[in-house]
Image: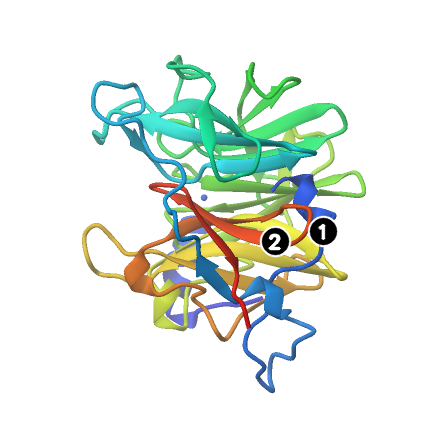
Amino acid sequence: MIFNARRTSWLLATVCCGGLACLAGPSIFAPALVAEQPAAEFPAELVHWEPYAKNPIFTAAGPGHWDEKIRERGWILKEGDQWSLWYTGYDGTKAGRRMLGYATSDDGLIWTRLAQHPLIDEFWVEDVHVQKVGDMYYMVAEGLNDQAQLLTSKDKVHWKGLGTLDIRYTDGKPLTPGPFGTPTTYYEDGTWYLFYERSDQGVWLAKSKDLKVWNHVQDEPVIALGPERYDSKMIAVNQIVKHKGKYYAVYHGSGSTEKPSLWTTNLAVSSDLIHWKKYSGNPLRPESENKSSGELVYDGEQFRLYTLHDKVQVHFPKKK
């Protein structure tokens, strides 16, 4: 477990916030070779990236549209030759309702909106993550006031809301009131794993067999703030990918004191989903680029790194 002692008292007070196609491909995180983090832990194809010359590849529709701006994490899923993008659009105001949008692509670079209206506008949907298991698509997302929720779909377009996630401490008691957002799921051997943050002050892990009740693996964060500057103020996991027998977390963090904050995209590795080691070469892109909500997608030949807030940008493996 990575833990920041400087945050211990706050965390105790708080405790007392893709797709399978990626999992089948090769791995993508590799730092520069360093003695304490050998190449086997962070393969080069996962950490060395260069931005696509034609970025951004998808942006908000702008004034006069329901998706005047794009907010927080979107999600890209590749199935065969079909690429899907779910994203959150809103009017740009703090109180504006976050609504679910959808776009498709044949190459993951040129995108077409499904329609000139959102898929969901009757309730708040933000910071989405989609995973397909069997014939069903499962979406976890933030609802109003950063309350993580579950939705399901059989066709990627029509979604059924199943309500707020029921997360419990290790003693079975419900989570204390407050935000719990940036929900991210990982499914393996009949068990669902949920990573989430609380006010971006740490990443917690819970698991479930039935998607109805989520029980903490431990009541302390499995990934904590810092100690380096790039994630010393805020942190949240966006994706879990399994590669070559290890688990990799794509996460974003901020050490910025500016308003609005600057965000970075980063990597960590684990052998058990509980104990994580951050890549010593983080962040993957300079803080000045302010790229977050990262996701790794395997395109059939190589991994791509997408960042999806507040516009979609893609990065390809850096050429030697």
Tell me: residue 218, above or below residue 75.
Answer: below
Residue 228 visible in this rendered orientation of the protein: yes
Pointer 2 residue:
303
Identify the amino acid type marked 1: Gly
Residue at horizontal 60 percent and vertical 87 percent from the top: 35
Q: Quadrant of residue 38?
A: bottom right
Element marked by disc 2: strand
The colour scheme used here is rainbow
Q: Residues within 10 Å of mark 2 (few under 14, many from 20)?
A: many
Residue 147 on image: x %, y %: 43, 32
Image quarter hosting the C terminus: bottom right
Q: How crowded is mark 1: few (under 14 residues within 10 Å), some or many (20 or more)?
A: some
Q: What element carries label 1?
A: loop
> Of the residues shown, which amino acid type is indicated by label 2?
Phe
Q: Quadrant of the N terminus?
A: bottom right
Q: In this view, does 92 lie to the left or right of 234?
A: left
- Residue 310's mark? none
> Which residue is painted at 66% across and 57% down in the image?
273
> Where is mark 1, residue-wise?
25
Q: Residue 271's x, y, as percent?
A: 71, 64
How far apart in space, not on screen, are marks 1 and 2 (Cα)? 8 Å
CB atoms of marks 1 and 2 within 8 Å: yes
Residue pictured at 34% horizontal, 56% vertical: 263
